[in-house]
Image (spheres, coloured by chain):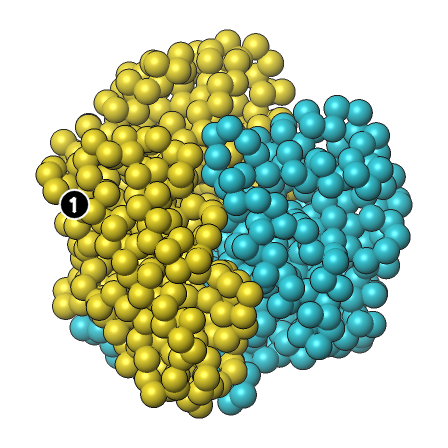
Chain colours: A cyan, B yellow
Amino acid sequence: MGLENASFSKTEYDRRIAQTRSAMMQAGIEVLFVTDPSNQAWLTGYDGWSFYVHQGVILPLEGDPLWWGRIQDANGALRTVWMDDDHVLGYADRYIQSTTCHPMEDLASHLEARGYSTSRIGVEMENYYYSAKAHEVLFSELPNAVPVDATALVNWQRGVKSEEELVFIRKAAAISDKIIRIALDKAEPGMRKNELVADISHAGITGVGDDWGDYPAIVPLTPSGRDATAPHLTWNGNQMRTGEITFFELSGCYRRYHAPLCRSVFLGKPPQSMVDASIALTEGLEAGLEAARAGNRACDIANALNNALNKVGIDRGGRCGYPIGLSYPPDWGERTLSLRPTDETVLLPGMTFHFMPGLWLDDWGLETTETILITEAGPAQALCNVERKLFIKD
Amino acid sequence: MGLENASFSKTEYDRRIAQTRSAMMQAGIEVLFVTDPSNQAWLTGYDGWSFYVHQGVILPLEGDPLWWGRIQDANGALRTVWMDDDHVLGYADRYIQSTTCHPMEDLASHLEARGYSTSRIGVEMENYYYSAKAHEVLFSELPNAVPVDATALVNWQRGVKSEEELVFIRKAAAISDKIIRIALDKAEPGMRKNELVADISHAGITGVGDDWGDYPAIVPLTPSGRDATAPHLTWNGNQMRTGEITFFELSGCYRRYHAPLCRSVFLGKPPQSMVDASIALTEGLEAGLEAARAGNRACDIANALNNALNKVGIDRGGRCGYPIGLSYPPDWGERTLSLRPTDETVLLPGMTFHFMPGLWLDDWGLETTETILITEAGPAQALCNVERKLFIKD
């Protein structure tokens, strides 16, 4: 298919591959097998819901990358990757969910044919789509190769966003604004949660103007009351009720790029402790944005937040954010650094984070968060535009 | 929380656990660690979008199972599993996406404390959520334990559905009917694909009457024209056009249970070859339903289908279906048997399949499929009710 179908310019893909190769050389990796769907898309443009079978990108130190996957999905690769058609490799359908053969046998034969049977091969050991079995089969087929753990090697290259990527993330942020407002507007006693999520999803996929909405890597999280003490429960058909808080953890998605945003709404008159917590949370977010400057460290954001929360007696614990951008289910985080007191990673202009200090307490939960961009100078910029507070509908 | 929050009766969970233990004993497994979110839910009721971090169910040969996961998600377990609260174990947030420690260290310490440090421990080697790294860490922490590959051990127990489960699948099927009809009704030249998917998603989550819709394990697949030569491309913002075929691969979802259904629509007058293929496909589906009888084998369905397709010169290759039921992303299949000529698994009453003979040809693609139930006697029952043909809007 070539570049006319890709999301980004050739310059952008060249940059990505050059950066990744530099990291490969530093790790002594001669060929990299990339399983993470986000990393595959970032390197080649591949886009399809086929990550439930084994597939990946083979990146040598020279030449264009190769996309490898199930034969029927090779058709999807021909429609989405920027490389020439001869850089798409398909394996036979008989390997799919078979008990007698494994797709990694096919991958091994390709690596062997290309001269990598004794090479140092990078694999993403900690990834949803690189199973324990896949690892076992690949290296039992290539007994003289040396596995090198390349977990997050590509992910780390994705941390600083290009201008092209920021255009996508800003479009996602505009969709996030839209869907959070819809959630806040429509929340009312008697509203069934699934009907509210139906409206949120409809608005998210419709998008904003010409910017159509893609599927977010996490479905809408919208728990109420005691369910909001847990961060990851999904919806049901219950009605919203007076006297309950509900948080909305949502993200717009534009061509796989995300900008998560959370707000909370209380139906009725909230207890003072909740109001106090929400005010402290807003102060903590603002202190964190001030600390989120190029040259500062990830922990500086977490510490600024925690200082504000400690003032009202909340000891949050846990991390309060993670890098975001291009992603596929089941996670919209990049899985590299974390915003937490122990992480001393230096912040660079162009990094984007979901600054996510969710509060999950014994009886209720509250989320007010921002997608933020580290700028050249000054505090971080919040990419969404919804008032930073607990919304109250009395 | 206990049983009042669970999806099923105690009798149903007892049956599931007894079956699984019987399979464990046959495999010589003393304790099973279940990673697959569908298997976790099937055994304990756990339901949340938290499978992007390490979590699982520990099933010993005696006593209730234990749910183990991130501390903040333990709150979600307390809200969803049927076991007593002391059967929920949470690990500290510092393990999350850390480069210095791994959650499997915590799991290992629990297994050791329970006397399993030299046991035969079953793990799902081929599963999205059991990474190569997780396996490496778990058994380096338990050097005297013996790993046993328990891939699909629980999945196989899920094959025959109980009456309680069939109630859920029929509700999902009613939602599938609704959303396929909406897709077929609204498809027209000029309709933007994302807007159509927005309507489909809205209807699916709204559900049917009191039966609210859950998120399906695969997003709507709705490619048109040449994009329909690939089975797994997702949508974009392009307009539908006269002269193009579009297939809709969708599933309603009721409390995590699925009933996938596919239909295709041609806008304009389709070429005769496409009409012929669609007629042969319908004949093949009907022949397959006739062959899908208790006591016959999985391959009998595939062969019946292929005979009908061969008559019009289509040699499909690939499998034509898989078991379905309870599922989480990224796949709504159960990953056990396959409907294909080489699979001789005997069909049993209560098995449910997505009979899925998609055609992905050089220039176009066509999908007409059914969710089917193997009955006590006679041919399989299709659970959805949409006319089995290529829809044409001229």
The quarter of the rendered structure image containing the N terminus of chain B is top left
Identify the residue shown where x is 67% and y is 74%.
A5
Q: What x and y, as percent, mark residue B183?
A: 32, 76
Q: Which residue matches tag 1? A: B379
Q: What x and y, as percent, mark residue B138?
A: 57, 25
Q: Residue furthest left?
A: B377
Locate residue A25: give its quadrant.
top right
Q: Is residue A194 visible?
A: no
Identify the residue shown where x is 49% and y is 23%.
B149
Q: Chain of mark 1?
A: B
Identify the residue shown where x is 71% and y is 77%.
A4
**In-front residue for pair B49/A241:** B49
Is residue B136 shown above or below B131? above
Q: What x and y, as percent, mark residue B205?
A: 29, 67
SS category of the residue bearing label 1: loop
A34 to the left or right of A252: right
Q: Amino acid at mark 1?
A: Pro
A379 to the left or right of A281: right
A117 to the left or right of B131: right
**In-front residue for pair B353/A331:** B353
